[in-house]
Image (spheres, rainbow, N blue to C red):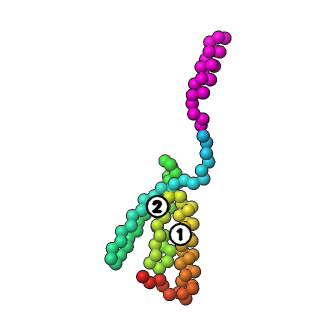
Amino acid sequence: MFAHHQSATAMEHSHANQAPIEHRFNPYTDNGGTMLAIAGDDFAVIAGDTRSTSGYNINTRYQPKVFEVGDNIVVGANGFAADGETLVRRIAQRIEVSNTARNGEELSC
């Protein structure tokens, strides 16, 4: 009985020295991705991988990260996939509204 009491006391002391464990919920995850863009005087090239990950898990191998949002306008977005998709949709909508306001005339540099 004495040995049991001693081990319980020793266990209490070992727990007292440990930091509390925090558990937090974070709905966002970095889905990763790699992108590369190269521009010259009369060209631009943008490339992105199609793998979406969460930690060590591969969610899909077919998640695009480069999107055409208008004539000769391309957007690349990686990281949290839902934020990237929302950004691309918003940019495409603004381009469409802008084109409608100009009666379909293209943007010029």
Residue 88, numbered circle: 1
Callout 2 secondary element? loop
Instruction: Write down the region rendered in magenta.
Output: 1-21
Q: Position of residue 61 (x, y in %)?
A: 48, 58
Seen in the picture, residue 92 relative to 6 is either above or below; the reply is below
Position of the N terminus, as image quadrant, is: top right
At which x and y percent is residue 2? 65, 11
Is the residue marked by circle 1 packed among few (<14), some (14-19), or many (20+) residues within 10 Å?
A: many
Question: Which x, y percent locates residue 3?
Answer: 62, 12
Tell me if residue 25 comes above or below residue 50 in the rendering. above
Residues at circles 2 and 1 in contact by the CB criterion of under 8 Å: no
Where's the C terminus, which quadrant?
bottom left
Magenta stretch: helix, strand or loop mostly:
helix
Q: As shown in the figure, which amino acid type bears the numbered disc 1? A: Val
Whether residue 52 is visible? no
- Residue 80 seen in this snapshot: yes
Q: Is 5 on the left or on the right of 72, as rendered?
A: right
At x 57% / y 71%, what residue is drawn? 90
Quadrant of the rendered image containing residue 45: bottom left
- Residue at the farthest left position: 41
Which of the 4 image quarters holds residue 41?
bottom left
- Circle on res. 50: 2
Farthest residue, direction right: 1
Along the viewing direction, whichever of 103 and 67 lies nearer the viewer: 103
First along the sequence among labels 2 and 1: 2
> Is residue 7 located in the magenta-colored stretch of the structure?
yes
Q: Secondary structure at mark 1?
A: helix
Mark 2 or 1: in front is: 1
Q: Amino acid at mark 2?
A: Thr
Residue drawn at x 57%, y 25% is 14
